[in-house]
Image (cartoon, rainbow, N blue to C red):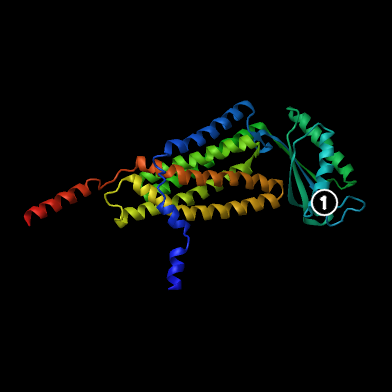
Amino acid sequence: MTSKKFKKSRFSIDEVIANSKFNFVKNLKWFILPSIAIFLVGLILVCVLGFNFGIDFTGGSIMTIYANDENLIADASTFDIENSTDFNKMQNKIEQVLESFDIEGASYQKTTIDIEELGVYHGQAIVVKYQNNVDDVDAITSINSQIQTKLIETFSYGTNQDAILNGGIITPSASTEMVVNAFIAIFVTMLLISLYIGLRFGLTSAFTTALCLFHDILITSSLVAMFRFTVNFTFIASLVVVMMYSTCNLIIVLSRMKEYQRSGRFDGESNEVIANSTIKESMTSLIISTMVALICMLLIGVIGVSYIRAFAFPIVLGILSSFYSTVFLVPGLWSIAFKHKNKKQPVEAQNTEKLQEKAS
């Protein structure tokens, strides 16, 4: 008796969601409005301020500075950049040098470096990327040489010039080619995902998937423009991850829709009923997967260094956008586009029953 009472009194969020009367399909027009608002704000900001492009897209220079963590260069500054305090100290010294050349807004990331002359293999180093404040290539080359010389003096590397590598210049023309290649990569990824969904679930599902992926890319890009995150190849990688995550969410929903159609559970029911039931019964799985992904990416963003944050935070925005599109847009879009192949079957079944009744 006790176990029966426990079962009756137990609260089930699945049951609450499944039994709710909220209609996702009928409210589609209201769900589209927030997405349009975010996109318009992002579009205005891009038109007025542009994206906060990194040197991967705008062009610039690269410098790699050895941290001397192995203490092989006598009387030189020694840093362990795995320690955040040392990393910040080294970064501050580099910033002071760059500011003396009127260069600001550089990006910093950890790397490894090999210096055969010193016997350094996979030693700690920092890659510095910065935008040049002049356009002439010869002038940039001259300034970079001066920056390299001053960095050697700042870190007391003396004659060990190989401890600071001048990585050269990324020209604007090369950057334009990178932008084009990045957009091609995103388009091809979206096309392949839509093709896979179309082969597995049909053309309607492929159409819905393409719209949702396009929505997630636009919303994520708009939010990145609003928050002024740096747009570089790390951001492009983030967009690809967002598309993969969105695809997983869509497969959960589309698989259940296909399962319902095959099971006969919703024979004779409208697309609206099928779509609403699918989302309500998938909601718990979508919420749990979204929360787990968000927690992981937020931890990576908080704990990681700057270039890891540049990768993690756009993904966080994309995960939220993906959840929104999957839950609030997919039901309505699929319901509008899907056409039953056996739409007349319920009527024919009714006529057959009537004939059988007359015959009896």
Question: Which quadrant would residue 238 be assigned to in this image?
Answer: top right
Name the outermost residue toward the left: 359
Disc 1 residue crowd, few under 14, some 14–19, many 20+, Cα 10 Å:
some
Total numbered circles: 1
Residue nearest the viewer, comparing 18 with 218: 18
Name the outermost residue toward the top: 48
Quarter holding the N terminus?
A: bottom left
Q: Position of residue 223 (x, y in %)?
A: 59, 37
Q: Residue shown at 77%/32% (left/top)?
A: 140
Q: Position of residue 206 (x, y in %)?
A: 40, 44
Q: Position of residue 329 (x, y in %)?
A: 44, 42
- Residue 174 in view in this figure: no
Residue nearest the viewer, comparing 294 with 89: 294
Q: Which residue is mark 1?
A: 86
Q: Residue shown at 81%/51% (left/top)?
A: 85
Q: Amino acid at mark 1?
A: Asp
Question: Which quadrant would residue 137 be assigned to in this image?
Answer: top right
Residue nearest the viewer, comparing 242 with 41: 41
SS under mark 1: helix
Q: Residue shown at 82%/32% (left/top)?
A: 101
Question: Which quadrant would residue 340 be assigned to in this image?
Answer: top left
- Residue 165 in view in this figure: yes
In this picture, is 31 found above or below 3?
above
Q: Residue shown at 63%/30% (left/top)?
A: 50
Name the outermost residue toward the bottom: 1
Left-right relation of 202 to 239:
left
Left-right relation of 135 to 158:
left
Quarter holding the C terminus?
A: bottom left
Q: Position of residue 162 (x, y in %)?
A: 82, 47
Left-right relation of 346 to 336:
left
